[in-house]
Amino acid sequence: MTLLPWVQHMIEQPGWRTACTAMGILILVVLAPINLLLHKRPEDIGLRPDGDAAPSASTKPVSYVVDHDWAGIDWTLRRAVRTARFWWISLGYFGGLYIWYAVQVHQTKFSARHRLQPERRGLGPGRRQPARHSRPDLARTPFRPGGA
């Protein structure tokens, strides 16, 4: 919530190139060090997969694995890329992100057409307020679908 208005301000004042550079630096400075703190396997911090506790000797472990052969494969990127499952998941993510960004692009145009303050456009649909106009005749101009 606080990042998007800052980015909008950066785009309006110094320009989009400066905003992109600042976001890149922010990602490198903040997110890269955080990744060094992550553990690759739950066993590294004394846990089992999915946060399960170690089973006691008297209980039989429950397995939710459907395909044991598939789960037993040591996956590499090269091996995963050769499977249909990888491409179906990739297609699903691509489609979802494509739809999300298509909505965002049109939402920006919609916000501009409805004369919303530029710093409010980055907040999302639930947090908007109409702009205050220096020209009252513009504030009363009705919205006409299709332009003009």
Image (cartoon, rainbow, N blue to C red):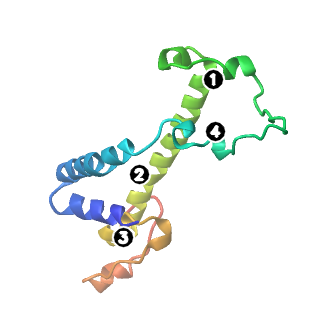
Residue type, numbered disc 3: Arg
The numbered mark, 2 or 1, whose residue comes first in the sequence reads: 1
Q: Nearer the viewer, mark 3 or mark 4?
A: 4
Q: CA distance from mark 3 to mark 2?
A: 15 Å
Drawn side of residue 74 relative to residue 29, left or right: right
Q: Judge the density around disc 4: few (<14), some (14-19), many (≥20) Cα neighbours within 10 Å.
A: few
Q: Which residue is mark 2?
A: 105
The numbered mark, 1 or 3, whose residue comes first in the sequence reads: 1
**In which quadrant of the rendered view does residue 70 lie?**
top right
Q: Which residue is mark 1?
A: 85
Disc 2 + disc 4, Cβ < 8 Å: no
Disc 3 + disc 4, Cβ < 8 Å: no
Drawn side of residue 129 relative to residue 135, left or right: right
Q: CA distance from mark 2 to mark 1?
A: 30 Å
Element at label 3? helix
The numbered mark, 3 or 4, whose residue comes first in the sequence reads: 4
Q: Which residue is mark 4?
A: 49
Q: Which residue is mark 3?
A: 120
> Residue 32, how many percent across, how many down?
32, 44
> Residue 51, how many percent across, how many down?
64, 46
The correct choice, above or below, for 72 with respect to 27 in the image is above
The correct choice, above or below, for 8 with respect to 116 in the image is above
Residue type, numbered disc 2: Val
In front of the other: 39 or 120: 39
Residue type, numbered disc 1: Arg
The numbered mark, 2 or 4, whose residue comes first in the sequence reads: 4
Where does the C terminus fall, quadrant-wise? Answer: bottom left
